[in-house]
Amino acid sequence: MNNEYTSNRRTRLKEFSRVRLGVYQMFYMPFLIILLIPILILAVIIWREKNKLILLLDIPNIMIPLIQFVVNFLSVSIPLLLLAGLFVTIGNITAQKDEADLEEAFTSQDLRNGCPILVFKKRIRGTEVTVREFQSSIPLNIWIDRMDAIADSMNISFVEKIDYGRANGRRVVIHTVPGREIKSRGNLYDEDF
C-alpha cells in the first residue's frame, strides 16, 4: 500500500512538473510560441462555427439547450486539452535527455525510489551557465559522490557546488556549463632530465 502511494505521488509530481516545465520553456524560448498558433486558430474556428453545427444537426427543440451546453463545453475544453498536451510534450522533450543522463550516473540502489525529476531548466542570458532543478529522494552526499559521473554522463562542468534543499528538502539545483572540464594532471615530464 505504501509503495503504491509513493508511486502515485511520484507520478502526479512528474505530470505536474512536465506541464510546469513546458510553460517555463515557452517563456525562455519564445520561438516555441509558434506552436500555439494552430491551437488558437482551431479555438477561433470552433467558437465561430459551433452554432452552425447545432443548426446542421436535426435535433428536437427540447434537446437544443443540452446540445448547446455540450458544444460550448467541448469548444472550450478541446483547445485547453490541446494546450495542456503541448505543454506536457515540450516538458517531456526538455526533461528526457537530462533525466536519462542522470539515470546513467546513479546506481540502481540510488534509483530505488526513481530517477530525479527535472522541474526547472533555464540558461542564464549572456552566459553559458544552465540552471537545472531536480526533485529527488537521493541524499546530498550521494549527489556529491556522483558529481564526476554526472558531469561525464551529461558532458557538463559544475560552476557551483550542488545546492540542496533550497525551498524544499528534496530539490537539487545544479549550475553547469557545457563541456567536461579537464583536470590538471600535474607535470607530465621531468625538466631535470
Image: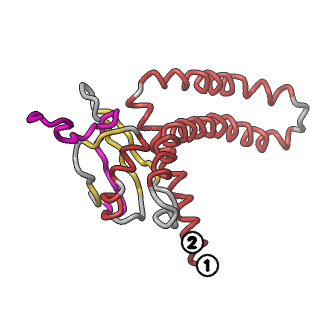
Q: Which residue in the structure is indicated by mark 1?
A: 1
Q: Report the front residue among 72 and 108.
A: 108
Helix, strand or loop at disc 2? helix
Q: Report the front residue among 104 and 24.
A: 104
Q: Amino acid at mark 1?
A: Met
- Left or right side of 126 for 151: right
Q: Residue at x 47, y 45 (%)?
A: 101
- Left or right side of 185 for 46: right
Whether residue 180 is visible: yes
Position above or below: 18 against 1: above
Q: Which residue in the structure is indicated by mark 2?
A: 5
Going by the picture, which residue comes out furthest to the front?
Answer: 193
Q: Residue at x 35, y 66 (%)?
A: 139
Q: Amino acid at mark 2?
A: Tyr
Q: Residue at x 61, y 78 (%)?
A: 1
Going by the picture, which residue comes out furthest to the left?
Answer: 192
- CB under 8 Å between callouts 1 and 2? yes
Q: Position of residue 70 (x, y in %)?
A: 74, 42
Q: Report the front residue among 86 and 62.
A: 86
Q: Quadrant of the C terminus?
A: top left
Residue range in magenta is 168-193
